[in-house]
Amino acid sequence: MKRGCPYGSHRVIEPAGELPQAAWKIDNTPQIYSNEILIDVTRLNIDAASFAQIKRETQENTERTSQMILDIVRERGKHHNPVTDSGGMLIGTVIEIGEEIAGKIDLACGDRIATLVSLTLTPLVIEKINEIKFTVDQVDIAGKAILFESGVYAKLPPEIPEGVALALLDVAGALPQTARLVQLGDTVLIIGGGGKSGLLCLYEAKRRAGPAGKVIVLARSDTSYKRALETGWADIVIQGDATKPLAVLEAVKEATDGALVDVTINCVNIPGTEMATVLATKERGVIYFFSMATSFTAAALGAEGVGKDVTMLIGNGYTHDHAQISFHALAESAQLRKLFEQLYS
Ligand SMILES: NC(=O)c1ccc[n+]([C@@H]2O[C@H](COP(=O)([O-])OP(=O)(O)OC[C@H]3O[C@@H](n4cnc5c(N)ncnc54)[C@H](OP(=O)(O)O)[C@@H]3O)[C@@H](O)[C@H]2O)c1
């Protein structure tokens, strides 16, 4: 067996010299190098921004959606949506571990795992699409994937339904990052707070801001609005459209007596919400763009254009121990667990 680069550069086909995430095409041959892991894949969790774009394009037609997913993987060797530039993650069973890493990692053949690295860098072969779960952004498949030596993964706890674990781990960075950013007494705005990552941020933001703080959610549809309201974790839930910056500014001014918010967390799955996020945030406040649909230029030039001095953070998908922390939140809050089970089981 040959040894590969720990970051997977040995599988890059084009352009040469790139790392797999930035590459257009990677080699998805399901035969491992001595420092890789082979996974028998059963389900993909397509990134929300990517799946929203695919659904818009195919109008949720099952055949066209399957074809689009198959085409992306056939062309690129990975599920890397060329429009949104985002991927997702997967669950499956470990079926082979390269000889150089076997015994050095806490994995054995037969273990059920979720990969915690993006599908945009994961060599993937889809043999068959079995079911497309449009409401939860998940796709049941038969296929194979490769995890590089540097790839992060989590073993699936048997007590949590796999659909729930997959949904939770897809956005595992959201809750620990919220914990880092929100201080006692803060006013926090969560845009898209009725969605998957939004609910995790909402739960954690309320715990961190405490009784003297204020947590506001902006939700679009009736369903998201009702879901966020019924958690009881938000002090105020606003129903509105984050692509309408001035309307959002007015609503947030009203909710905060004109003060605006200390921390804004953007969890939407569509483009064009940067300026609502910027305008709602106080001078010297903090913005956490968790959304993959965020445009760096729209945020940076937009903030400059309105003379707003805010700290803007990119939502790093990885935080130390994020899987463990997210599983812990589910164990700690029966309400959060019930919510995720209702939505993603
Ligand atoms: N940074 C990372 O590492 C990372 C990892 C995974 C995912 N993500 C990204 O995080 C984002 C959220 O993912 P998710 O899985 O939580 O998605 P999700 O469950 O689909 O939630 C998205 C939310 O955005 C809301 N929304 C959409 N358009 C809106 C608008 N115009 N105004 C206000 N709210 C709006 C949706 O509300 P309605 O249902 O009412 O439309 C929904 O509640 C996506 O962009 C995804 O790509 C980032």
Image: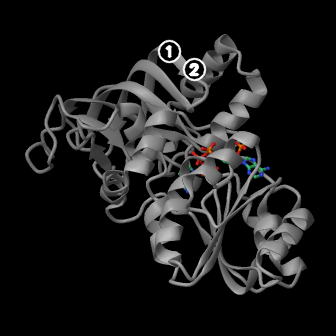
Secondary structure at numbered mark 2: helix
What whole-number distance in Å separates the C-alpha atoms at marks 1 and 2? 8 Å
Q: Name the one closer to the observer, 198 or 48.
A: 198
Q: Name the one closer to the observer, 140 or 100.
A: 140
Residue 209 place in picture, x, y as percent: 53, 77
Q: Residue at x 64, y 34 (%)?
A: 51
Dot 2 amino acid type: Leu
Q: Is residue 238 left or right of residue 142?
A: right
Q: Nearer the viewer, mark 1 or mark 2?
A: 1
- Residue that numbered label 2 is attached to: 70
Dot 1 amino acid type: Ile
Do tag 1 and tag 2 residues touch (Cβ < 8 Å)?
Answer: yes
Asked if residue 3 can be seen in this view, the reply is yes
**Where the N terminus falls, by quadrant?**
top left
* Residue sitting at the far left: 103
61 to 195, vertically: above or below: above
274 to 279, vertically: above or below: above
